[in-house]
Image (cartoon, rainbow, N blue to C red):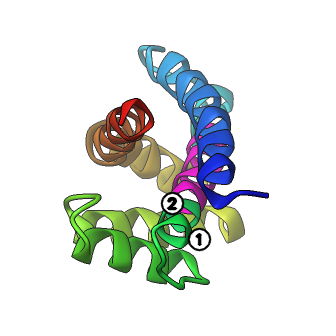
Amino acid sequence: MNSDVRWQQRFDNYRNAFARLETALGIEGPSVTEQAGIIQFFEVSFELAWKVLKDFLVAEGFEVKSPREAIKTAFQSGYIHQGELWIHALDSRNLSVHTYDEAMAAELTENIRTLYFPILMGLKEWGELQIKR
């Protein structure tokens, strides 16, 4: 499959997952169950986000294999901003997949809302600009 097409197809999936996250974040005072849904939508969105970056970078001639490498390369190449925050989001995503308690869920939900959602929104806007090129 052409790598230019691959990243765009994955980006379409990212936009769909991002839209679900955005809707979930519209819930004021989410219950524990709703927080779990927000976290799940974040996990899926973030997974697709780094894979979009990876596929785009491969199409641009880079060789990347891991999420951390994709984020670092995309940041160094100027495709994304706030590289440290992206790495922090990656670490949070990795932790959330393996650990769960109510205090962690509440903190992660707040971080998703205030820190991670804006960088994911930035990726959505960046991807839409890339497709128009």
Instruction: Say above or below: 111 vs 33.
Output: below
Which residue is drawn at the image coordinates 24% and 77% (left, top)? 76
Which residue is drawn at the image coordinates 54% and 83% (left, top)? 64
Query: Would you identify the image quadrant in which residue 127 lies?
Result: top left
Which residue is drawn at the image coordinates 42% and 14% (left, top)? 28
How busy is the neighbourhood of tag 1: few (under 14 within 10 Å), some, or many (20 plus)?
few
For badge 2, the amino acid type reads Phe
| CA distance for labels 1 and 2 | 22 Å
Residue identifier under label 1: 94
Residue 49 magenta-highlighted? yes
Q: Main secondary structure of the magenta part?
A: helix
Which one is earlier in the sequence, the residue at label 1 or at label 2? 2
Instruction: Say above or below: 3 vs 6.
Output: below
For badge 1, the amino acid type reads Asn
User: Residue 87: percent from the left, percent from the top?
Assistant: 37, 72
CB within 8 Å, label 1 to label 2: no
User: Residue 119: percent from the left, percent from the top?
Assistant: 31, 46
**Disc number for residue 24:** none
Task: From the viewer's perspective, tell me whether residue 84 is left or right of residue 13.
Answer: left
Residue reaching furthest right?
1
Q: Nearer the viewer, mark 1 or mark 2?
A: 2
- Please state the extent of the stretch shown in magenta in the rendering: 40-52
Which residue is drawn at the image coordinates 28% and 59% (left, top)? 79
Label 1: which secondary element: helix
User: Dividing the image into 4 quarters, which one contains the C terminus?
Assistant: top left
Q: Nearer the viewer, residue 6 or 40?
A: 6
Residue identifier under label 2: 56
Q: Nearer the viewer, residue 81 or 6?
A: 6
